[in-house]
Image: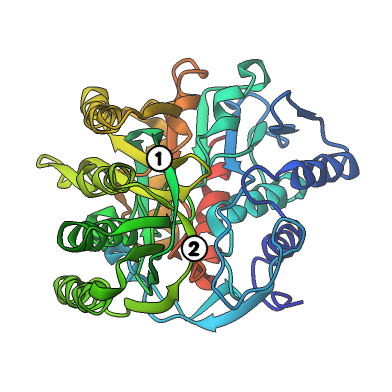
Amino acid sequence: MVLDNYQPANVWKYFEEIAAIPHGSGNTEAIADYIMDFAAKHELEAQKDEVGNVVVYRPASEGYENSKPVILQGHMDMVIAKNDSCTKDLAKEGLELEIIKGGEPTAETAKQYEHDEWLSAKGSSLGADDGIAVAYMLAILESDEIKAPAITAVFTMDEEVGMIGAHGLDADLLKGNILINIDNETEGEFITGCAGGMTVQCDVPVGKELISPYVIELRIDGLTGGHSGVEIDQYRLNAIKAMGRILLGVFQNFGMRILTIDGGEVDNAIPKKSEAAIIVLEEVKDDAIALIKKMFDEIKEEYKDTDPNMKLTLNEVGEQEVRAFGDASTLAAIIPIVNFPDGVIRVNNTFGSVETSNNIGVIRTLEDRVRIESTIRSTKRSAKLNVLEQMKSITEIFGGEVNITSDYEGWEPNKDSEVSKVFAKAYEDVYGNKPVITQTHAGLECGILGGKIEGMDAISFGPQADDIHTFNEKLSIKSVERVWNVLIKGLESMK
């Protein structure tokens, strides 16, 4: 086994077992059954609710019978991302784990700690978000040695696609109001509040007609990408926005029409690639290709610091009878992606963090429409709704419709949080310095669970993981052990 010689041994054992089970969003039944089987094996009370969440109960340790009960929480699903060389069907096959040398982490707060080896998955995302939470919780639940109050371990399903599990969780299954969420990827950082979010699906109708012009295929890839709630403030290039910008230029100069346009993988990840097939008249094809290359070079120069590895691939298919978008439909597909807000929209000057953002995460060409999927985030609901209205007004100009597929509230920080104080002390005992107490622009289930847990006192933290939601995702080996020590010391301090 890849992780046999690493500590904490039981955490890595469970992570390896989890990695062998396909558990992408929308495919969590097998991992839920695995957790239910785990509970039965260890004679722990467990329930699986109607939407597919699993809740496992661990009784209080001796001497902790009168302590306030604690809720541990993480999600079972992972974002599936693969590079072009990965042939695995991750809906049916597990991950192929490997240890790599990853250098320093991206987060400044984590650079003060040692990071030597990292865990990754060959050709695909790792699912450290949030597989490490599942592994931590299973290792705690099975242990007779770890001293802690009564624990309710909540394993939610489909967090990555709208926090479906948290929304549907039966509040009656929860015992206590102290929540420890293990879904933060920056070591040294304690989260005490988060933005609310909304996932939006915009469908623009398109009409197609049979035509025999000159077909050109273009692909933009090699972009840095990242999590739209974590790396949005890095101002990295969005591959869909780049494609829209180029296609608009070709349309304005040569009357181009679109055959297909596709890009991105999930709505909450900054797209790393996009593809399009277009048609132009043969007599202007050389000029059109020259313009595409010129515009790409301009964009590459603009984003050379954030996306140094971006590249353009062109393929001249030639004359071919195809069903292409009409002129109006081509414009209807381009204008939204060019004009939808994207990236950081507003920064909160008080906290120095992102307040409002939008991420155009996915575009797909369907039979009679183009679908654009985005994630809007904001600490202020009014700002979130304002971005929605901007997108809606543009979509409806072209006869399209907008659907909200998920809408969740933010998590208001509690300056008097007792659990934050307990774990800050545990952190100081382990690290010798204080953690950074902050808020995150990423969506956390704490916001939703706060509506189900009266008087919720919550904190979110976790080990260092970089490039989550991408096939470069990696998890710091040493960080996992350090954060485990904080978690156990904090639980033991809650007597």
Residue 166 figure quarter: top right
Q: Nearer the viewer, residue 306 or 293?
A: 293
Residue behind mark 1:
206
Q: How is the image coloured?
A: rainbow
Residue 196 in sight here = yes
* Crowding near the residue tagged with mark 1, few <14, some 14–19, many ≥20 C-alpha atoms within 10 Å: many
Say which quadrant the C terminus sits in: top right
Which of 317/99 is in front?
Answer: 317
Residue 305 makes an appearance in the image:
no
Question: Relative to 194, is 148 on the left or the right?
Answer: right
- State the image coordinates of residue 453 (x, y, percent, origin top left): 51, 19
Q: Secondary structure at mark 2?
A: loop
Residue lying at the far left of the rendered structure: 349
Residue at 60% x, 39% y is 158
Q: Quadrant of residue 281?
A: bottom left
Residue at screen point 48% across, 50% down: 266
Which amino acid, by three-letter code, is at mark 1?
Val
Decide which of tag 2 and tag 1 comes sooner along the chain: 1
Could you say which quadrant of the image residue 75 lies in? top right
For this rendering, which residue is in front, 328 or 161?
328
* Secondary structure beneath label 1: loop
In which quadrant of the rendered image does the N terminus lie?
Answer: bottom right
Image height of 177 relative to 355, above or below: above
- Left or right of 198? Residue 472 is right
The CA span between labels 2 and 1 is 18 Å
The kind of residue on which mark 2 rests is Glu
Residue for badge 2: 321
